[in-house]
Image: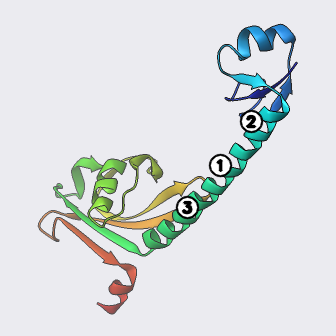
Amino acid sequence: MEVILIDDVFELGKRGTVVTVADGYGRNYLIPKSLAIPATPGNRKMIEQQRLAMAKKESKYQEEAELLTQELNQLHLMLSRKSGETGTLFGSVTSKDIADLLKTTGIQLDRRKIILNQPIKSIGNYTIEVRPHSEVTAELLLSIVAEGDEPVSKIKKKDEESDA
């Protein structure tokens, strides 16, 4: 029996693929659990239309991510935090803190798109990797300063730094 997978099925295939399975497996498991539909000509046509719509939506999403990447590459964020005499922060700066700081610039970005191998725990300059899309990566400059040295949060374009 040929079926079209509606969802990813472990060790069988990904969504939208046509697979041949035993009749009982298809009728008694895959179809009742809404994991697959019979591979009729009408269903094949419907799945192909969905695939084209998804490809169009994915390309639009990638273009938006590339525009966001260009904007992120131009930013230099500054954040002031309480710290000890050695430059160690009281607490740490996490991806959530960076996402909240980006919101003040008008950039909505999910914190899971900000890649930090570990939380930032000391004063200094950091290059933060941001992945708004699986195929697009941006680098964001972040300066952590001791509280009292700079305003609480300051945002500059990289071009403005060279002018000052």
Question: Does residue 10 appear anywhere in the picture?
Answer: no
Give the CA distance from mark 1 to mark 3.
22 Å
The extreme bottom residue here reads 163
What's under tag 1, amino acid-wise? Met
What's under tag 2, amino acid-wise? Gly
Q: Residues within 10 Å of mark 2 (few under 14, many from 20)?
A: some
Decide which of 85, 149 is in the foreground and name it.
149
Q: What element carries label 3?
A: strand
Which comes sooner in the sequence, label 2 or label 3?
A: 2
Q: How is the image coloured?
A: rainbow
Q: Is mark 1 on a helix, strand or loop?
A: helix
Question: Does residue 116 appear anywhere in the picture?
Answer: yes
Decide which of 1, 90 is in the foreground and name it.
1
| Image quarter in which the C terminus is found | bottom left
| Image quarter in which the N terminus is found | top right
| Residue 137 disc label | 3
Decide which of 69, 6 is in the foreground and name it.
6
What's under tag 3, amino acid-wise? Thr
Give the CA distance from mark 1 to mark 2.
11 Å
Q: Mark 2 — residue?
A: 16
Q: How crowded is mark 1: few (under 14 residues within 10 Å), some or many (20 or more)?
A: few
Q: Mark 1 — residue?
A: 54
Q: Where is residue 151 in the image (x, y as percent from the top left)?
A: 15, 70
| Residue 25 disc label | none
Q: What element carries label 2?
A: loop
